[in-house]
């Protein structure tokens, strides 16, 4: 097996580019602070005006970075912003970069060390909602594009940037918008910068994210709750029936018992498993950090496989009967559970939800009325080991961080990744620079200023090397 060697490729004006990024870093941090100050909380209808104002500011930032075209587009929900950097010309390849400008709610406010939307700098950190997820990465990309334009007069590739206003609520409006504007987002590669590394000095490339699906199951054994003294021992208890059903969803070794659940699951290539094991965090430390009393999941599988590369079925909520203060001696008539599944490459979210639902209904047959309500889901996305862009990404991280990156996966789901890959018809590469401890979605979200500069340099290198990778034969990564 061979790996493309870019180590001797000399970027145009490399030192000049580094100096430009360093000299203008504070300008981009100030622009980021101004964007953080806009409370673009997409889930809050009271702040819809702020979300729209943020979209307009993103459009202006795209123009400031050198975009030849930038516009705010209306959707059925919040706006989407598109910028196009076409300096490379019609014969050059095009990459589509996906980011988002909407953020999570800030609460609980009293736990913040400074106002959530202030963007206060404290040492090497800028603290504020959206600094890490995902307004900071937006300005990493804009700084890299501007540096190339200023220092080289052009770009090695054409770059389209799509900035979503609904990522934090599942991007419900984006698919239809993409389908209507397919020509505007046509590209040879999709780049998503919404993933994390193992640490500031542990550069990491995410090779894939798991998919997901969800459902809710309701079990009814009686018309209404009844007195446990009168009917206890005679009437079926919905809570107990549901509990037995849920407990039977896994066998003694932690494997899911739903018929067909693993039908489309294949083992990772040997080189992929080796790379993941090399990058794996210490399992004991991983679990001790959350106060885990014991391990879960499939017996015989390494922790890194269980959380990054295997499908799961988890009960995420259960309720039944009386849950208030004191005791109410009843037999509950209804019990309900919410179930979430993480999926791998070839598992279809709709089909897996259907199989789980059918199995639950079969388990409850003859004991209760079982109603299953299917939720939403998204497919897993994986960058191929044979992808010609993977060596380019590895060289880019090496250039930005001064050491070889490790290859990892993420156990979570980015539903829009599969949608973009499908509609654009191009491979998806996760080019993320988040840190695992940046408190995304929590109080005191922060962005490392050192990481901001390193990532910007890595992105510059990536764009410089990408054209050759998109035009050469595929090679296998060693």
Image (cartoon, rainbow, N blue to C red):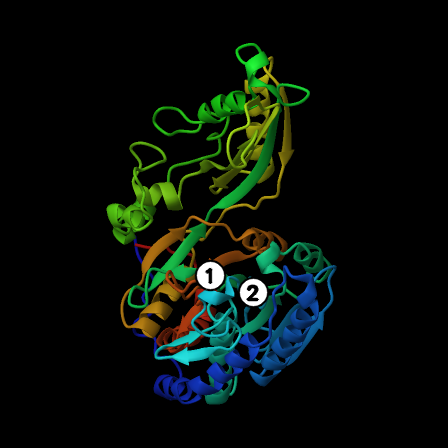
Nearer the observer, 378 or 14: 378
Residue 328 appearing in the image:
yes
Up-down relation of residue 404 to residue 328 (above or below): below
Q: Nearer the viewer, residue 347 or 328?
A: 328
Secondary structure at badge 2 equals loop
Q: Quadrant of residue 447?
A: bottom left
Q: Which residue is mark 1?
A: 442
Considering the image in quadrants, where does the C terminus appear? bottom left
Along the line of sight, the residue nearer the viewer: 393 or 5 = 393
Q: Is residue 116 left or right of residue 450?
A: right
Residue shown at 34%/42% (left/top)? 305
Residue 353 location (% of width, % of height): 57, 34
Residue 259 in sight: no
Task: Kindly give the residue lying farthest to the front in the view shown.
Answer: 326
Q: Which mark is residue 103?
A: 2
Q: Residues within 10 Å of mark 1 (few under 14, many from 20)?
A: some
Q: From this viewpoint, which residue is outermost toward the top?
A: 234
Is 144 situated left or right of 57 in this image?
left
Residue 363 x %, y %? 54, 19
Task: Give how far apart the Cα atoms at labels 2 and 1 are.
Answer: 11 Å
Q: Give the residue at x 53% y 24%.
A: 239
Q: Position of residue 324 (x, y in %)?
A: 54, 36
Q: Residue at x 27, y 68 (%)?
A: 403
């Amino acid at each position: 097996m061979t790996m493309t060697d870019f180590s001797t490729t000399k970027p145009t004006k490399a030192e000049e580019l580094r100096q430009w990024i360093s000299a203008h870093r504070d300008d981009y941090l100030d622009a980021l602070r101004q964007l953080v100050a806009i409370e673009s909380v997409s889930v809050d209808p009271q702040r819809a005006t702020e979300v729209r104002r943020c979209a307009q500011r993103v459009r202006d930032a795209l123009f400031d970075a050198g975009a030849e075209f930038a516009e705010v587009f209306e959707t059925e929900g919040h706006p989407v912003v598109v910028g196009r950097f076409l300096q490379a010309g019609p014969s050059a390849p095009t990459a589509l970069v996906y980011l988002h400008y909407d953020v999570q709610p800030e609460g609980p406010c009293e736990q913040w060390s400074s106002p959530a939307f202030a963007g206060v700098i404290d040492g090497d950190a800028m603290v504020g909602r959206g600094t890490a997820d995902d307004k900071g990465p937006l300005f990493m990309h804009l700084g890299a594009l501007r540096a190339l334009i200023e220092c080289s007069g052009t770009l090695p590739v054409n770059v389209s940037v799509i900035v979503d206003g609904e990522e934090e609520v599942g991007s419900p409006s984006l698919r239809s918008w993409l389908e209507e504007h397919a020509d505007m987002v046509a590209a040879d590669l999709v780049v998503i910068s919404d993933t994390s590394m193992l640490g500031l000095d542990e550069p990491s490339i995410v090779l894939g994210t798991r998919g997901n699906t969800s459902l809710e199951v309701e079990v009814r054994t009686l018309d209404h709750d009844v007195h446990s003294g009168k009917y206890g021992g005679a009437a079926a208890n919905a809570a107990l029936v549901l509990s037995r059903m849920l407990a039977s969803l896994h066998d003694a070794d932690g494997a899911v018992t739903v018929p067909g659940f693993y039908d489309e699951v294949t083992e990772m290539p040997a080189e992929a498993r080796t790379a993941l094991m090399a990058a794996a965090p210490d399992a004991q430390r991983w679990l001790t950090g959350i106060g885990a009393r014991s391990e879960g999941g499939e017996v015989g599988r390494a922790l890194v496989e269980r959380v990054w590369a295997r499908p799961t079925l988890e009960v995420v909520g259960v309720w039944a009967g009386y849950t208030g203060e004191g005791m109410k001696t009843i037999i509950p008539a209804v019990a309900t559970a919410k179930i979430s599944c993480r999926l791998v490459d070839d598992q279809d979210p709709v089909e897996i939800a259907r199989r789980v639902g059918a199995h639950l209904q079969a388990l409850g047959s003859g004991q209760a009325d079982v109603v299953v309500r299917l939720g939403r889901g998204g497919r897993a996305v994986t960058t191929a080991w044979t992808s010609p862009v993977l060596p380019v990404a590895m060289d880019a991280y090496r250039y930005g961080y001064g050491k070889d990156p490790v290859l990892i996966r993420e156990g979570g789901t980015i539903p829009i990744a599969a949608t973009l890959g499908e509609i654009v018809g191009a491979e998806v590469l996760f080019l993320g620079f988040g840190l695992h401890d940046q408190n995304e979605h929590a109080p005191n979200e922060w962005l490392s200023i050192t990481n901001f500069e390193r990532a910007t340099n890595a992105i510059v290198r990536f764009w410089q090397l990408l054209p050759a990778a998109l035009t050469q034969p595929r090679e296998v990564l060693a």
